[in-house]
Image (cartoon, grey):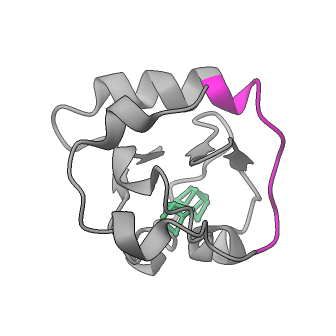
Amino acid sequence: TYVVLDACIKCKYTDCVEVCPVDCFYEGENMLVIHPDECIDCGVCEPECPVEAIKPDTEPGLEKWLEINREYSEKWPNITAKKDPLPSADEMADVKDKEQYFSP
Ligand code: SF4
Ligand code: F3S
């Protein structure tokens, strides 16, 4: 499965949503997550994200974010169409370690 990481927080560009063939993105207040059981591992979303917030779970160290994607994809609504990024998106695009801003 692919995983949305903290780089998405306070950006939410949603370019990823547009390309997903199985509509497996779910929307929180300030980030998206991928449903790990619905993702078919096609990989097309990864290069679409302007802040490189999407990675395959085969990369080391992503366990925590995989669990967050699993948990919140069961709680948040599905999103299937691109929309405007958050107003803070460009300002927050280069900020590292955004976990502190996560909104459940
Ligand atoms: Fe959707 Fe493919 Fe990205 Fe998985 S890897 S979230 S199926 S676009
Ligand atoms: Fe987030 Fe990148 Fe998608 S910022 S909403 S993962 S395009």
SS majority, magenta: loop
- In the rendered structure, the answer to whether residue 37 lies left or right of residue 61 reads right
The quarter of the picture where the C terminus appears is top right
Task: Check the image and report above or below for 47 versus 8.
Answer: below
Who is closer to the viewer here, 11 or 24? 11
Who is closer to the viewer here, 38 or 66? 66
Q: State which quadrant residue 93 falls in.
A: bottom left
Q: Residue at x 52, y 64 (%)?
A: 42
Who is closer to the viewer here, 1 or 62? 62
Q: Is residue 74 magenta?
A: yes
Residue 40: x %, y % from top left: 60, 52
Task: Check the image and report above or below for 74 versus 92.
Answer: above
Residue 58: x %, y % from top left: 26, 42
- In the rendered structure, the answer to whether residue 50 lies left or right of residue 17 reads left
Tell me where the magenta segment starts and ends, as one range.
72-82
Q: State which quadrant residue 18 falls in.
A: bottom right
Q: State which quadrant residue 28 falls in.
A: top right
Q: Residue at x 24, y 58 (%)?
A: 95
Q: Residue at x 61, y 20 (%)?
A: 71
- In the rendered structure, the answer to whether residue 49 lies left or right of residue 35 reads left
Q: Residue at x 82, y 64 (%)?
A: 80
Q: Which residue sits furthest left?
A: 60
